[in-house]
Image: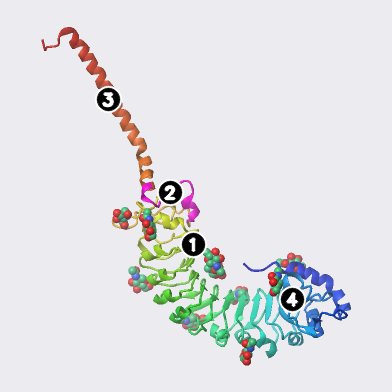
Amino acid sequence: MRPSTTGSLLLLRIVLLYSAAVVVSQPANAASTSSTLDPKQVRALQSLYIPTTHDPCTQPSFHNATVCDNGTPFRHLLSLRLSNCSEDLSLSTTALSSLSTLTSLSFVDCHVPIVHFPTSLSINLLSFTSINSLQRLTGVFLSRFSNLTELDISGDSIKASGIHIITSNMKSLNTLTLSNTNLTGLIPKHWYPKLSHMDLSENKLNGTIPTSLTLLENLRFLNLSSNQLTGEIPSTIGDLISLQNLSLSSNSLSGSIPGSISTISRLVHLDLGSNQLNGTIPRSINEMKGLKYLNLENNNFHGVMPFNASFIKKLTVFKINGNDNLCYNHSSISKKAKLGIAPCDKHGLPILPPPAADEPSSSVDDLSSGDYDDGGDSGKKKKGDDSDHGPNKVVLGVAIGLSAVVFLIIFLIILSKCGGRCCGCC
Ligand SMILES: *[C@@H]1O[C@H](CO)[C@@H](O)[C@H](O)[C@H]1NC(C)=O
Ligand SMILES: *[C@@H]1O[C@H](CO)[C@@H](O)[C@H](O)[C@H]1NC(C)=O
Ligand SMILES: *[C@@H]1O[C@H](CO)[C@@H](O)[C@H](O)[C@H]1NC(C)=O
Ligand SMILES: *[C@@H]1O[C@H](CO)[C@@H](O)[C@H](O)[C@H]1NC(C)=O
Ligand SMILES: *[C@@H]1O[C@H](CO)[C@@H](O)[C@H](O)[C@H]1NC(C)=O
Ligand SMILES: *[C@@H]1O[C@H](CO)[C@@H](O)[C@H](O)[C@H]1NC(C)=O
Ligand SMILES: *[C@@H]1O[C@H](CO)[C@@H](O)[C@H](O)[C@H]1NC(C)=O
Ligand SMILES: *[C@@H]1O[C@H](CO)[C@@H](O)[C@H](O)[C@H]1NC(C)=O
Ligand SMILES: *[C@@H]1O[C@H](CO)[C@@H](O)[C@H](O)[C@H]1NC(C)=O
Ligand SMILES: *[C@@H]1O[C@H](CO)[C@@H](O)[C@H](O)[C@H]1NC(C)=O
């Protein structure tokens, strides 16, 4: 998922070209008619070890590390991406001041301590990314990027008393990723309505999921997995009409799954695994036609699992194991389907003992592999039953046939004896 490899060649080129770049410190194409990068920005790039022997605007180094506007007399940088940086790189406020025209700035595998960002750069930025990069990030530092539409911090610790410190002024925020950043505190109640992507996974957030989150009509992606969230899933979760991917896994959520979840018609990915959810699984989930990924493992659900074989076969991933009081109806699902839960008795309770834990989780591949009959439609199901009983019927048929032959022979013998001796009828 992460664009992780862009840096390797870049860095090699940076290292190889750096000395040359220092020598040729004037813009290379000064004589040409088309405009070139502002010399101030050329010097700033050099201080960041970005090669400038060729005009970085016309020959952007590896993978668009630099993108420029078409200004005259000089062009200016719009986007800069530093990846896999060398150990001795350091940021300077002077260089950053020269780069205030940037609207997009990314650091990927670039371990440098932050320095003060000039206000002109902070408010010009629309996109800011730090993946396994900036050290000593704070909430206050990030909050100054007030015009951001996209913020992605992953794998870097952020010191802040809560997420609201960072986002409370970012009115235009569209995509927010704060993942594996050691953030603590609560999920903010207030969000601006443009938000369509929220990934707060792998932090130390606690408290409940605020009901106000379900007002975000544009939210397509929500990942709150691997935090310490408690309480129930808001019953209004179905109001998130744009939602496609939802993960609340690996928290301490309790209560039951709100039935309204099945009204989210575009949902393709639903991961509620490893919580303390209970109650029965809403039958209405069966009607979610677009669902491809469904994980309900390691919870406390009880009763009869409402999914039949044709529903499960349409999923690419289905996990339900680790629910000790949940069972499946073996007249609609093959016993060979290794779901990791027990079949039900006629009262809808798990038949004990639970199945051997040979497969900790089942995948749909297990289901559709050769040892599973086609399931789904009842015609095929009956056929399966017939062939199951086949061997018994053959034995029965042979037995009946044999006894008929024996009776026939006895009858013929009696008949022939009678024919000779007039057999008492005479
Ligand atoms: C980063 O650069 C170093 C050279 O300094 C190289 O050995 C390494 O493979 C690069 N890593 C990535 C992920 O590009
Ligand atoms: C580089 O940027 C241009 C313009 O923004 C874009 O069209 C192109 O696809 C980008 N190339 C890569 C490799 O990202
Ligand atoms: C950026 O934010 C400032 C205030 O923080 C505002 O005055 C300015 O118009 C915004 N610029 C853009 C491009 O949104
Ligand atoms: C989060 O904190 C733990 C312990 O304080 C530390 O080991 C870990 O590296 C931190 N994570 C990040 C992404 O900095
Ligand atoms: C959340 O964790 C903090 C410590 O990080 C604690 O002080 C606070 O009481 C917790 N809040 C809830 C609602 O659990
Ligand atoms: C949610 O985040 C976790 C941890 O970062 C990741 O493993 C998982 O794939 C994400 N879920 C979705 C739906 O992207
Ligand atoms: C959403 O979920 C689908 C199905 O699991 C997956 O293929 C897709 O990559 C996910 N989208 C994102 C942005 O993670
Ligand atoms: C589910 O758990 C909640 C608290 O976690 C409890 O109040 C409720 O009675 C449980 N419901 C069932 C059906 O077990
Ligand atoms: C299992 O399914 C069959 C046929 O669909 C139904 O008659 C039976 O009541 C179900 N058993 C349970 C325990 O739900
Ligand atoms: C399985 O469930 C789906 C959705 O509820 C339903 O349309 C279908 O008829 C069911 N199939 C069988 C064989 O019961």
Res. 231 in view: no
Disc on res. 66: 4
**Who comes first in sequence, dot 2 or dot 4?**
4
**Quadrant of the image containing the N terminus:** bottom right
**For the residues bearing labels 3 and 1, Cβ distance under 8 angstroms:** no
Amino acid carrying mark 1 in the image: Lys
Can you name the residue that lies furthest to the left here? 426
Quadrant hosting residue 147: bottom right
Amino acid carrying mark 2 in the image: Asp
Q: What residue is drawn where x is 43% and y is 61%? A: 322
**Residue named by callout 1:** 292
**Residue named by callout 2:** 374
Answer whether residue 377 is magenta in the image. Answer: yes
Query: x, y percentage for residue 198?
Result: 54, 76
**Residue named by callout 3:** 403
CA–CA distance between discs 3 and 2? 38 Å
CA–CA distance between discs 4 and 1? 38 Å
Amino acid carrying mark 3 in the image: Ser
Q: What segment carries the magenta color?
A: 362-379
In the image, taking residue 225 as reference, residue 111 lies left or right, namely: right
CA–CA distance between discs 3 and 1? 57 Å
Q: Secondary structure at mark 2?
A: loop
